[in-house]
Image (cartoon, rainbow, N blue to C red):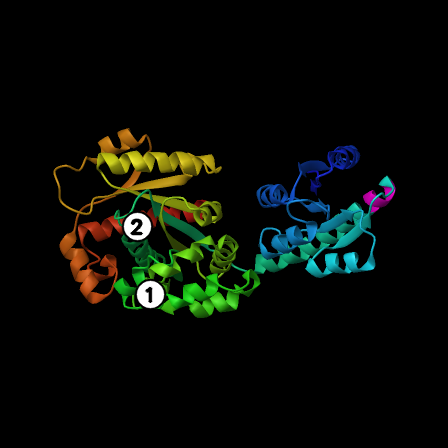
Amino acid sequence: MAEKILIVDDDLDTLRLVGLMLQRQGYNIVAATNGEQGLAKAFEEKPDLILLDVMMPDMDGYEVTRRLRKNPITATTPILMFTAKTQLDDKVTGFEVGADDYLTKPTHPSELQAHVRALLARSEKRDEGGDAEANKEHRGFVIGVLAARGGLGVSSVAANLAAALSSRAQADVILAEMTPGHGTLGLDLGLNDGKRLNDLLSGATVEVTREKVQAALIPHVSGINLLAASDNPRDVHLTSQVAHYEALVSRLSTLARFIVLDLGVGLPLFVQRILPMCAERILVVEGVPNSIHNSKILIDEIAAIGIDRKAITAVLNNRVRSESQMPWTQVQEKLAHSIATTFTPAPELFFQAARMLTPAVVCQPTNVTAQQFFKLADQVMEHEQAR
């Protein structure tokens, strides 16, 4: 497959000429005319090399490079700065912010081609070494749990699924609540330390190391390891730390066989970035018209970010006994999406579990509702084996 090169330059003539020249050499070319567009293209297209102009009006190449290096997606992507600036200090600045190579305009086509080939060759060797290391590092099965609106039991489903997986698979399971400012799992399980997630989402992205993430996990008597979110509403601003979330999920995936993420409600930007990193996406639905309407819209929006509808597992969570709730067959018809599992109401079970600070499946594993969570865990394990 041809290597992909992203060219970022506000000069349309340069874009056209350089792009055409490299295209004739067999490269796949992607173009952007400003810094913001260049960043978006880089994160979306994941190019093998970025050819970056320095002098651009909205955001110069130095700032673009800084942002590229802060994002795990592009942290190691080769960057060739291509600019009319010739001063030594300008080149030093380029290298300091993370550029791999530097060429001044105008340059002979053969010189540009030689630099491009050299950077791609070095990157290929580095990736081969990195892949060897990655193969030694276990990658777990990441499960994202979310809903279209609040109050549908996302945290409860996530916690009980995690506990059921721990019991069924007899393996390491992480339960991570990814919603700072809206944390409930810490209180529910008696391990209320949301400051650990706050620390991971603060500071520089490169500080989200495997060791730091592992140290943030708290063991629970149910067998799961918990990363709880803060319950302080002021901490909700941390959901804007998208690159930190991507790094966090990547690190979590190396620490357990199953990683269950409580993604909360809706489709904020951090959830849009995390969902493609998940091997399983579980959507919690309630059997009432408004919930079904909102859930159907959410499925459409998840599909719009490039995730196959068939890769979304819908579960029907009937939390209270009510004649107004529809049977699963009717919910499935109105949702236009299959229902994998239905959880029957068990308020007494969940009240007892809350008193014992443990998931319901641990409190009464033989209960009908608990068995339904075990059924979902079995399905997840089947999907893991088929991966």
Q: Is residue 337 left or right of residue 9?
A: left
- The residue sitting at the front extreme is 57
Q: Magenta span covers which residues?
A: 110-114
Q: Is residue 348 above or below residue 41?
A: below
Whether residue 116 is in magenta: the answer is no
Distance from the alpha carbon under mark 1 to that under mark 2: 20 Å
Q: Secondary structure at mark 1?
A: loop
Residue 187, given in percent of the width and then of the height, sits at 27, 64
**Labels 1 & 2 near each other (Cβ < 8 A):** no
Q: Residues within 10 Å of mark 2 (few under 14, many from 20)?
A: many
User: Which image quarter: residue 358?
Assistant: bottom left
Residue 154 is tagged as: 2
Residue drawn where x is 47% and y is 61% of the image: 201
Residue flagged by tag 2: what amino acid is it?
Answer: Val
Residue 129, relative to residue 84: is it above or below? below
Secondary structure type for disc 2: helix
Q: Nearer the viewer, residue 98 or 117?
A: 98
- Give how far across and how far down residue 132 sits, in percent: 63, 57
Q: Eyeballing the image, is 236 above or below 108?
A: below
Magenta span main SS: helix
At horizontal 16% and vertical 61% (from top left) the residue drawn is 352
State the image coordinates of residue 62 (x, y, percent, origin top left): 69, 53
Please name the residue shown 44% across and 60% down the image: 256
Residue underneath mark 1: 223
